[in-house]
Amino acid sequence: MIKVIGINWADDGQQEADITLSDGRFSITCFFSTSMSEQAIFTDKIYSLDARNIVRTEEKEALVQKLEGFYAYFLRGKLKEKAVIIGELKIELSTADIPKDIQDGEMVELTVSRLDIY
């Protein structure tokens, strides 16, 4: 179960925010432009922006590592149907150029410049 553990509203009209999600093991902060409250159960999609350097890895441990840049991350997880699965987090890679030699079920590493919820 993924929960909203923090919301930092960027404007007075509460239209845009930084939202922190956690499955209890992994946490990520995303750009957010819809309504939701803290402690809510999150069921929407998480979208990657500018996913790069997608490579297969022999590492079996999932990983979320914050990079420089407010929303930037290094991610490691299992590829499944154009998404990377990290714990209970499912991050869509639909616009990313996934190398053709990487198959569903394999572990991948990549960087993203931002994660969005909309």
Image (tube, helix red, strand yellow):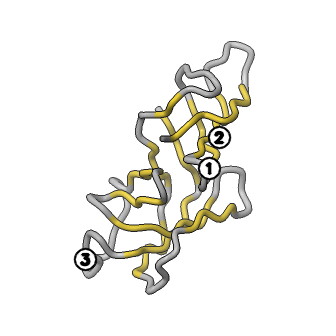
Reading the image, the residue beneath label 3 is 100
Q: Earlier in the sequence, mark 3 or mark 2?
A: 2
Tell me the amino acid under the disc marked 3. Answer: Lys
Q: Residue at x 36, y 57 (%)?
A: 83
Tell me the amino acid under the disc marked 1. Answer: Ile
- Asked if the residue under mark 2 is in contact with the one under mark 3, i.e. CB atoms within 8 Å, the reply is no
- Asked if the residue under mark 2 is in contact with the one under mark 1, i.e. CB atoms within 8 Å, the reply is yes
Tell me the amino acid under the disc marked 2. Answer: Thr
Marker disc for residue 20: 2
Q: Residue at x 41, y 59 (%)?
A: 85
Q: Earlier in the sequence, mark 3 or mark 1?
A: 1
Relative image position of residue 95 (x, y in whole percent): 35, 55
Q: CA distance from mark 3 to mark 1?
A: 28 Å
Q: Residue at x 69, y 34 (%)?
A: 6
Choose between 85 and 10: the one closer to the eye: 85
Which residue sits furthest bottom? Answer: 58
Horizontal side of residue 26 vs 54, given as left or right: right
**For numbered disc 2, what is the local secondary structure?**
strand
Relative image position of residue 29 (x, y in whole percent): 64, 45
Between disc 3 and disc 1, the foreground one is 1
Q: Earlier in the sequence, mark 1 or mark 2?
A: 2
Marker disc for residue 96: none
**For numbered disc 1, what is the local secondary structure?**
strand
Reading the image, the residue beneath label 1 is 28
Relative image position of residue 18 (x, y in whole percent): 67, 36
